[in-house]
Image (cartoon, helix red, strand yellow):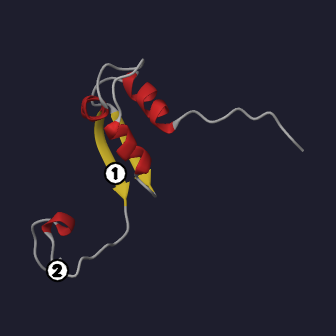
């Protein structure tokens, strides 16, 4: 069976449209899986939804971002991954 299914909206455009329509510091983003679209959002430029670039738009609209990632333990202790407490 063939159905006429509309193509999904571009993910970055959807993020920009939704973020631009929300009050400042009111959005929570929860990301599970690959963060490619979030990276593309941050790299995005001004468009019909907002004159702000991606980093500016996220800084203005998002109050919290929670990203689930894997446990990538480096061979050597790294503050980048584990904060300031050694031995964690």
Callout 2: 10 Å neighbours few (<14), some, many (20+)?
few
| Residue wearing tag 2 | 76
Q: Position of residue 29 (x, y in %)?
A: 38, 43
Secondary element at tag 1: strand
27 w.r.t. 30: above or below: above
Q: Which residue does the image show at 15% across and 77% down from the upper left?
A: 77
Q: Quadrant of the C terminus?
A: bottom left
Residue 33: which numbered mark, if any?
none
Label 2 to label 1: alpha-carbon separation: 25 Å
Q: Residue furthest right?
A: 1
**Left or right: 86 in relation to 55:** left
- Mark 1: few/some/many CA within 10 Å (<14, 14-19, 20+): few
Q: Secondary structure at mark 2?
A: loop
Residue 13 locus on image (x, y percent) = 47, 30
- Location of residue 84 by image quarter: bottom left
The percent position of residue 56, horizontal first and vertical second, equals 25, 30
Q: Residue at x 10, y 71 (%)?
A: 85
| Residue 36 horizontal/vertical position (percent) | 42, 50
Identify which residue is drawn at 83% across, 37% down.
3
- For residue 6, side relative to residue 76 (left or right): right
Q: Quadrant of the N terminus?
A: top right
Q: Nearer the viewer, mark 2 or mark 1?
A: 2
Q: Say which of 76 and 87 sits in front.
A: 76
Name the residue tied to disc 1.
66
Q: How many marks?
A: 2
Q: Earlier in the sequence, mark 2 or mark 1?
A: 1
| For the residues bearing labels 2 and 1, Cβ distance under 8 angstroms | no
Q: Residue at x 49, y 31 (%)?
A: 14
Q: Based on the displayed image, in which of its 4 quarters is residue 73 positioned? A: bottom left
Q: Relative to 21, is 66 above or below?
A: below
């Amino acid at each position: 069976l063939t159905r006429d299914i509309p193509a999904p909206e571009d993910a970055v455009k959807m993020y920009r449209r939704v973020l631009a329509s929300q009050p400042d510091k009111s959005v929570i983003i929860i990301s599970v899986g690959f963060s490619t679209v979030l990276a593309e959002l941050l790299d995005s430029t001004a468009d019909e939804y907002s004159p702000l670039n991606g980093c500016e738009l996220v800084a203005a609209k998002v109050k919290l971002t929670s990203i689930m990632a894997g446990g990538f333990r480096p061979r050597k202790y790294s503050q980048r991954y584990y904060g300031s407490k050694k031995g964690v």
